[in-house]
Amino acid sequence: MERTTCCVVGGGPAGMVLGLLLARAGVEVTVLEKHGDFLRDFRGDTVHTSTLTLLDELGLWPRFDALPYRALTRVRLRLDEGEVTIGDMSRLDAPHPMVAMTPQWHLLDMLATAAREEPTFTLRMHTEVAGLVRTGGRVTGVRLGDGSVLEADLVVACDGRDSRVRAESGLPLHRYDVPIDVEWFRVPRHPDDPDGGLGRVRRGRFLVMLDRGDYFQCALVVSKGDDARLRAGSVQVLRDVLTGMNPWMTGRLDAMTWDDVKLLEVSLDRLTRWSAPGVLCIGDAAHAMSPIGGVGINLAVQDAVAAARLLAHPLLAHDPEAVDRAGRAVQRRRTPPTVVTQTAQDLAHRRVVAPVLDAGPGDGEDAVPLPFRLAQRFPVLQWVPARAVGIGVLPEHAPDFARRPPLPLVAPAS
């Protein structure tokens, strides 16, 4: 039987940031990742303004800046009549006023490399959690897929919206009704194509395209349940929808099959209690976010920073009661920004996106949601979505124990 002070389940952005920060405090921390690498398609590949500031504070900006990324500074909406700008990152007062688009595995490799430089950090790949271990009503560790047990003073669930730890914890969950799903796919990009973040709105259609250099990562928003209807027919129907919205895509979708289109079943939920004795949930395990605004990663990272700051000293003292109090403090700290963001996403679902989808396709005037019209008429309002997406409601900053001067470049961890 092995033992660690803090067991972090899940090697995504929240888990890796939490592991790195706790290790810099001197806490013995073990991060468990069920996969053998970080190579996953159709993950959120955005690194937000507040996260870039955090990387600066951690001394990791030079390493991040050496990664391949595309800087997204403006978000635009394309109509038949032309383009309108709805968000302008350059208006943000931040060291790096942008959203950086980079494959998430690059970010996670960089964080893993930095964390491995700390003597109290351990990352175990190919390690799946099968369940929680309890002693006298308290979670005291995890049972692994191979039957072994890893004991811990605290187990932190960072294993996403389908969290096994969350399911086994029995913590109560509140769900929102969500009227949409998203189809994820890629479209080849040519040098003279539009760049940056681009939305395309027509009656009955809502498409988001994120510039990834040689391709667009695309999200076609559909009504809940429409995926099954679409897949029952030929993929040509989807091709026709896309080329009808963007004629310049003609010829680029001929090789597309349904295997190239991934369904993201959009959910919006939140634990009403994030912790119990010996266990804490953060990130998507505590609050699954909609892809609207792409802010889920931002909130997850900020949860991790707050959790590290509040948990470090109780974990170093091996004080169970103090650890549990700190877990409750994490929820108190992070619930307000979560509620504000989810409320805004719920309103966007019902008042912006759903009316566009319900309008029905046709040749009539484009259904331009009112917030977008206002942002175009009054450019100063473009700061609002930029702030909401890039920084968020309550940005967190690195605790003093985790800050470092700029670190030298090193080879990636994997």
Image: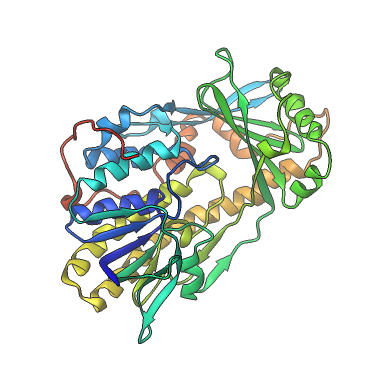
* Vertical arrangement, residue 85 with respect to residue 395, above or below: above
Name the spot of residue 331 as percent of width and height, x first.
38, 66
Q: Residue at x 53, y 39 (%)?
A: 41
Locate the N terminus and report the quarter of the image it occupies.
bottom left
Front residue of 268 and 384: 268
Front residue of 316 and 193: 316
Q: Residue 250 vs residue 121: left or right?
A: right
List the single residue furthest toward the front: 146
Front residue of 198 and 152: 152
Which quadrant of the view contains residue 156?
Answer: bottom left
Residue 377 visible within the image = no
Q: Residue at x 47, y 46 (%)?
A: 295
What is the total number of numbered labels drawn onto the structure image?
A: 0
Q: Residue at x 31, y 40 (%)?
A: 413
* Vertical arrangement, residue 146 with respect to residue 60, above or below: below
Locate the C terminus and report the quarter of the image it occupies.
top left
Name the spot of residue 6 as percent of width and height, x first.
28, 65
* Vertical arrangement, residue 116 with respect to residue 25, above or below: above
* Vertical arrangement, residue 89 with respect to residue 192, above or below: below
Name the spot of residue 234 as percent of width and height, x first.
82, 36
Q: Residue at x 20, y 56 (%)?
A: 120
Q: Residue 288 vs residue 401: left or right?
A: right
Front residue of 357 and 71: 71
